[in-house]
Amino acid sequence: MPIRTASLTNQIHKNGARLHLAVQTRARSQGADQPPSEAEQALLEERRELKAAKASLQAQPKAPKPQPLWMTKEAKAPAAPKAPRAAKEPKAAKAATQGNKPTRAEKLTKKADSLEAAKKATKKSAKT
């Protein structure tokens, strides 16, 4: 079962209290300039190990996890490039296909001329 980070924090806190007590005891009995005792060395080493374990547990969720198989997609092979198309033949000009069809402007001028001729005629047509 994995160790919880919260329990490591409490262990580090308790270890720090015991270490502080050991340092204070040594300082009062032997003096502050004396080297640390074996108990202090053991407490310091235990504290380093606890802090390293806490750091590794905190870094663990940030590491990438493997994807499940159903989520992974297989890479497709790249598609082969298509061959260039041949150029199409140009279409014939529209004027040649339409023949002698009159344009809009020609139709309007023809209509205007016919109206003028009808006005000048002696017999009135129904349109004028």
Image (spheres, helix red, strand yellow):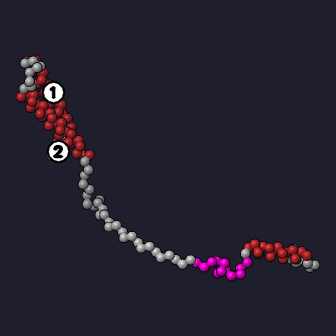
Image side of residue 51 versus residue 124, left or right: left
Tell me if residue 19 comes above or below residue 73 in the rendering: above
Q: Which residues are magenta?
A: 91-102
First-in-chain label (1 vs 2): 2
Image side of residue 90 versus residue 34, left or right: right
- Give the x, y percent position of residue 36: 9, 25
Farthest left residue? 38
Q: Tell me what residue is drawn at x 44 percent, y 73 percent.
A: 84
Task: Give the CA distance from mark 1 to mark 2.
Answer: 25 Å
Q: Tell me what residue is drawn at x 71 percent, y 79 percent.
A: 101
Residue 97 painted magenta: yes
- Give the x, y percent position of residue 4: 19, 41
Task: Name the kind of residue labelled 2 in the image.
Answer: Pro
Can you tell which quarter of the image residue 43 is in? Answer: top left
Q: How many marks?
A: 2
Local packing at callout 2 (Cα closer than 10 Å; few below 14, some 14-19, many 20+) is few
Q: Name the residue carrying label 2.
A: 2
- Give the x, y percent position of residue 23: 12, 23
Tell me if residue 28 comes above or below residue 14 in the rendering: above
In this rendered view, identify the residue nearer to me: 38 or 94.
94
